Amino acid sequence: MDQNTKKFNVAKAVIEYIHNDCILGMGTGSTVNFLIEMLPDVRNKISGIASSSLETERLLKSKGFDVQPLSDFGNMDLYIDGADEATKNLHLIKGGGGALTREKIIASSSRKFICIIDDSKLVDKLGQFPLPIEVIPMARSYVSREIIARKGQPIFRENFITDNGNEIIDVHNLDIVNPLTMEENINQITGVVTVGLFAKRKADILLLSNDDGVSEIRTEK
Ligand code: 5RP
């Protein structure tokens, strides 16, 4: 089965987790884009919707959804998003599409976060995928030196500006032994806006798509 079919299948599977009167947060990326295509089928269940990126907002509006700012809501009921890497502990690397800051904000303010992935994203240890870090532009060199001191190799993402007007550094070869400690450590470097490790606010449910179908992985909070 090809990767797009797996993405389609997991997007279809997550539809049944959208309950009546749902205040829904939508992530960003090609897996979520499959979900957006199907979302009109459950339009009557969705009482409010917020987006993690301008691109997702544009797609949702093209389907007739009234996308509202996150601040219009209290906590969201449900956040659905993909990931670049995930472990069975439900720790994630996100930000391949550069939307990590808004994604982390909505995930953090949601009661439930369901991450939808195909099996190519499941890893035993995070870090094969370069870790994205959104930085204030003037801090780019400073943050890069701090990352080198932590034994990572920072690569500036060329020709890319985030929806928040910032830049991205992709960090290669970091030894992420403890995702939560690493997230906290990188977060406190001055000039870092968001690190793409989702360990403090990890997923509550991982929906995993493979050749045999879609399975659910949960851990205790
Ligand atoms: C965007 C993200 C995406 O969730 C991640 O890149 C996965 O994307 P895709 O579904 O296209 O594989 O974090 O910032």
Image (spheres, rainbow, N blue to C red):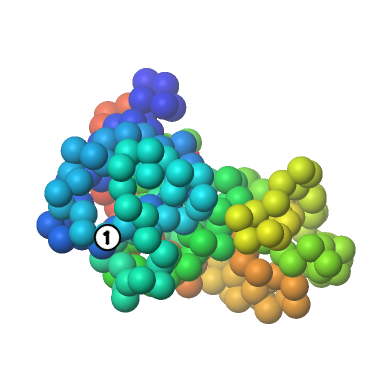
Q: From the viewer's perspective, is residue 56 above or below residue 104?
A: above
Q: Is residue 84 above or below residue 202?
A: above
Residue drawn at (21%, 59%) of the image: 47
Seen in the picture, residue 165 relative to 62 is either above or below; the reply is below
Q: Quadrant of the rendered structure where residue 60 is? A: top left
Quarter of the rendering containing residue 14: top left
Compared to 185, does 80 lie above or below?
A: above
- Residue 54 visible to an observer of this rendering: yes
Instruction: Please tell me how many numbered marks the rendered image carries.
Output: 1
Find disc 1 in the rendering and name its residue. 48
Q: Is residue 63 left or right of residue 55?
A: left
The quadrant in which the C terminus is found is bottom left
Residue 88 in view of the camera: no
Q: Position of residue 18 (x, y in %)?
A: 20, 52
Residue 130 at x, y percent in the picture: 67, 49
Q: Is mark 1 within 8 Å of ligand 1?
A: no
Report the residue that reaches farthest toward the top.
1
Residue at image location 37% in from the left, 20% down from the top:
1
Q: Residue at x 79, y 54 (%)?
A: 154
Q: Nearer the viewer, residue 102 or 124?
A: 102
Kindly identify the amino acid type of the residue bearing the numbered disc 1. Gly
Q: Nearer the viewer, residue 163 or 28?
A: 163
Q: Residues within 10 Å of mark 1 (few under 14, many from 20)?
A: many
* Left or right: 97, with 67 as reference point: right
Q: Which is more toward the observer, 198 or 163?
A: 163
Q: Residue at x 37, y 61 (%)?
A: 68
Describe the element under mark 1 as helix, strand or loop. strand
x then y, percent, for residue 162:
65, 54
